[in-house]
Image: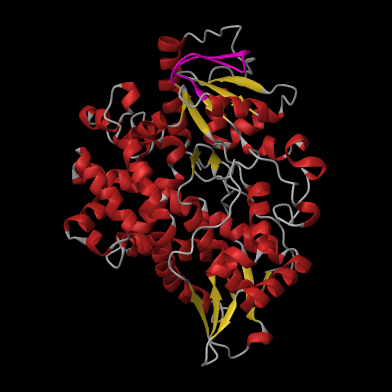
C-alpha cells in the first residue's frame, strides 16, 4: 500500500513540474486525448494504484479508438490496442525504440545518478556510449543453449528440496511457497554458492525495493517519498558489492560473468554495477512467482485438464532409472508435451497484463495518420489485445488450452503479433526460456506427485496487487492456504530431474 504522505509529496512535485515544464499542449494530429476524472493528477494516481494495468484500463473504456493519448505531466503516453498499429510500431523501430528505456531503468530503478555513468549507459544514437544496450545484447547468448541448460541444472537441484517439503507440511501458503522456491533457485543458479540472496534479510530488502517501485520509480526525493524501497535497494546493492569483492562471481553463471565483464570494460565501477544488479533480479523473480502460482491454480481448478496433462507427462517425460528413481525430463517437456506447453501459454495469455513500451526518439507519423511526438512514450497493453477476435478468433474471450498446439484444427488458431507476455519483437524478454523451464519443471513435478486443494475446498481467485510496476502476472496480496497430500500412485517412489545440455529452448510464441 502506498503511503498517503508519499502520494501528496509526489503529487505536489509532479504538479509543479507539470505547470512549469509541460503546458499540456495537444497537437490535433496526435491520437485523441483521454482525460481522467481527477484533474491534472488523475493518470499519475492511476499508474500508482494500477501499475501498467492503467494503460489497458483506459484503452478498454474507448474500444472504438485504436490509439489514445494520456497526459502524464512531463510526458504523454500513446496507448495502442490495434494489431495494425502494433505492426506499424515494429516498422518504425528506429524512432520508436526500447533502448532509451534502459537508461531510464538505470537512473530511476537502479538509482544511478552520476552524469558520466549515465552518459556511458546512454544509447549511441542519443550521443552516449551505448553500454546499456551492449549489456543486454551480451546477455542473450547466455540464456539459450548450453549456458541455459547449465543454469537449469543448478535451478533444478535447488528447487527439488522445496518440492520434497510439500509431503512434510499438509497446510501451507501456496503463493509464499512459490515465492521462496523461485527466489532460492533463481538467485543461486545465477550467482552461485556465494549467492548474496541466501541471507533472508537481503531477500526481504529486495522485496521492499520491488513492491515499492511504484513510488521509487518517480525518482522524486526518493529518500523521503519512497524511503522503504530506497533503503532496501541500497542494502541489496551493498550485499552484491560484497559478493563481488569476495570473488563470488567466479563460481557464478556465465550470465553473471558476462554482465560483469561487459560492464567493467565499458567503464562502470563495482559500486555502480552493484546498483544495476539490484534491478536484474526483477527479470527472474517478479513475474516467475505469480506465473508459477497461477499455473498451479488454473490446473488444479480444472480437474479434467489436470488429468490429461498428468497422462501426457507420464507417457512422454518420465525417465525411470535402474534403481527405480523417476525423473522428469526437461527436454521431453519441451519437445513431447504439447498440451502442457500450450496450456502454459494460454495461462500467460489470459493472466498477463503486459504492456510493451517504446520511447519516441523522433517525431513519427504512425501509419501515415497519427503524429507521435518525440520524448513521449508508446504503450501496447496486452489485455485489450488478448480479447480481440481479429487476433484470436471467436474464442478470444475463452480459455482454450489447445490454442497453441501445432496439430489438427488448432494449427492456425493463434495469430502472429497478438501474444505480448514476453514483449514485442524486436525486443523480447531474454530470460523467457529460463523462467519457463523453472515454472514447467516445478509444475510437472508438483501435479504428478501431489493432490492440492484450497483450505475451504473452493478454488476462489485471491485479490491481486494491481499496483506493481514490474510484475505483469498478477501478484496476489493475501495468503492462499492449501492442503497437499502425496498421490497414492507414486507412494514410495524416489524422484529426480533430468536435463541434457545444449538441447535448445522452448518453442514459445512471441509477439
User: Toward the viewer: 428 or 14?
Assistant: 428
Q: Residue at x 54, y 35 (%)?
A: 356
Residue lying furthest bottom in this view? 323
Q: Residue at x 46, y 37 (%)?
A: 214
Q: Is residue 376 magenta?
A: yes
x, y percentage for residue 82?
A: 67, 28
Residue 451 lies, with reference to residue 426, above or below; the image says below
Q: Residue at x 77, y 52 (%)?
A: 410
x, y percentage for residue 70?
A: 58, 21
Q: Is residue 367 magenta?
A: yes
The stretch in magenta equals: 361-377
x, y percentage for residue 331?
A: 54, 68
Residue 148 lies, with reference to residue 87, above or below; the image says below
User: Toward the viewer: 148 or 101?
Assistant: 148
Count of numbered tags: 0
Residue 458 seen in render: yes
User: Toward the viewer: 320 or 3?
Assistant: 320
Residue 237 seen in render: no
Q: Quadrant of residue 51?
A: top right
Amino acid at each position: 500500500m502506498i503511503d498517503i504522505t508519499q502520494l501528496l509529496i509526489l503529487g505536489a512535485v509532479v504538479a509543479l513540474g507539470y505547470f512549469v515544464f509541460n503546458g499540456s499542449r495537444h497537437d490535433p494530429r496526435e491520437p485523441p486525448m483521454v482525460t481522467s476524472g481527477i484533474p491534472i493528477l488523475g493518470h499519475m494516481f492511476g499508474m500508482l494504484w494500477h501499475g501498467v494495468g492503467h494503460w489497458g484500463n483506459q484503452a478498454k473504456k474507448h474500444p472504438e479508438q485504436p490509439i489514445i493519448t494520456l497526459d502524464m505531466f512531463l510526458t504523454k503516453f500513446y496507448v495502442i490496442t490495434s494489431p495494425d498499429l502494433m505492426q506499424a510500431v515494429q516498422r518504425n523501430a528506429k524512432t520508436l525504440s526500447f533502448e532509451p528505456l534502459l537508461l531510464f531503468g538505470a537512473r530511476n530503478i537502479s538509482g544511478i545518478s552520476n552524469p558520466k555513468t549515465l552518459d556511458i549507459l546512454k544509447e549511441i544514437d542519443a550521443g552516449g556510449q551505448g553500454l546499456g544496450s551492449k549489456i543486454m545484447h551480451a546477455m542473450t547468448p547466455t540464456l539459450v543453449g548450453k549456458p541455459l541448460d547449465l543454469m537449469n541444472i543448478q535451478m533444478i537441484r535447488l528447487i527439488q528440496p522445496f518440492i520434497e517439503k510439500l509431503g512434510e507440511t499438509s497446510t501451507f501458503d501456496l503463493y509464499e511457497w512459490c515465492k521462496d522456491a523461485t527466489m532460492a533457485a533463481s538467485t543461486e543458479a545465477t550467482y552461485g554458492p556465494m549467492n548474496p540472496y541466501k541471507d533472508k534479510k537481503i531477500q526481504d530488502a529486495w522485496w521492499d525495493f520491488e513492491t515499492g517501485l511504484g513510488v521509487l520509480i518517480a525518482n522524486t526525493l526518493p529518500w523521503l517519498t519512497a524511503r522503504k524501497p530506497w533503503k532496501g535497494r541500497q542494502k541489496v546493492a551493498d550485499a552484491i558489492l560484497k559478493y563481488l569483492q569476495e570473488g563470488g562471481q567466479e563460481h557464478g553463471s556465465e550470465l553473471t560473468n558476462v554482465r560483469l565483464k561487459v560492464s567493467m570494460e565499458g567503464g562502470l565501477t563495482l559500486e555502480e554495477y552493484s546498483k544495476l544488479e539490484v534491478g536484474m533480479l526483477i527479470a527472474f523473480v517478479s513475474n516467475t512467482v505469480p506465473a508459477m502460482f497461477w499455473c498451479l491454480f488454473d490446473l488444479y481448478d480444472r480437474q479434467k485438464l489436470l488429468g490429461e496433462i498428468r497422462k501426457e507427462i507420464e507417457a512422454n517425460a518420465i525417465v525411470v532409472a535402474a534403481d527405480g528413481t523417476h525423473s522428469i525430463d526437461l527436454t521431453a517437456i519441451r519437445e513431447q508435451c504439447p498440451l502442457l506447453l500450450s496450456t502454459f501459454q494460454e495461462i500467460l495469455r489470459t493472466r498477463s497484463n503486459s504492456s510493451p513500451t517504446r520511447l519516441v526518439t523522433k517525431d513519427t507519423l504512425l501509419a501515415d495518420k497519427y503524429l507521435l511526438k518525440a520524448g513521449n512514450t508508446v504503450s501496447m497493453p496486452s489485455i485489450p489485445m488478448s480479447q480481440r477476435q481479429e487476433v484470436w478468433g471467436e474464442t478470444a474471450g475463452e480459455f482454450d488450452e489447445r490454442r497453441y498446439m501445432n496439430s489438427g484444427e488448432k494449427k492456425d488458431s493463434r495469430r502472429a503479433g497478438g501474444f505480448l507476455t514476453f514483449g514485442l519483437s524486436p525486443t523480447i524478454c531474454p530470460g523467457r526460456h529460463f523462467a519457463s523451464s523453472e515454472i514447467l519443471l516445478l509444475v510437472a513435478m508438483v501435479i504428478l506427485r501431489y493432490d492440492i486443494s484450497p483450505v475451504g475446498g473452493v478454488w476462489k481467485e485471491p485479490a491481486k496487487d494491481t499496483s506493481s510496476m514490474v510484475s505483469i502476472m498478477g501478484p496476489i496480496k493475501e495468503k492462499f492456504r492449501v492442503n497437499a497430500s502425496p498421490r497414492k500412485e507414486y507412494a514410495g517412489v524416489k524422484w529426480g530431474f533430468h536435463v541434457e545440455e545444449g538441447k535448445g529452448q522452448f518453442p514459445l510464441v512471441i509477439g
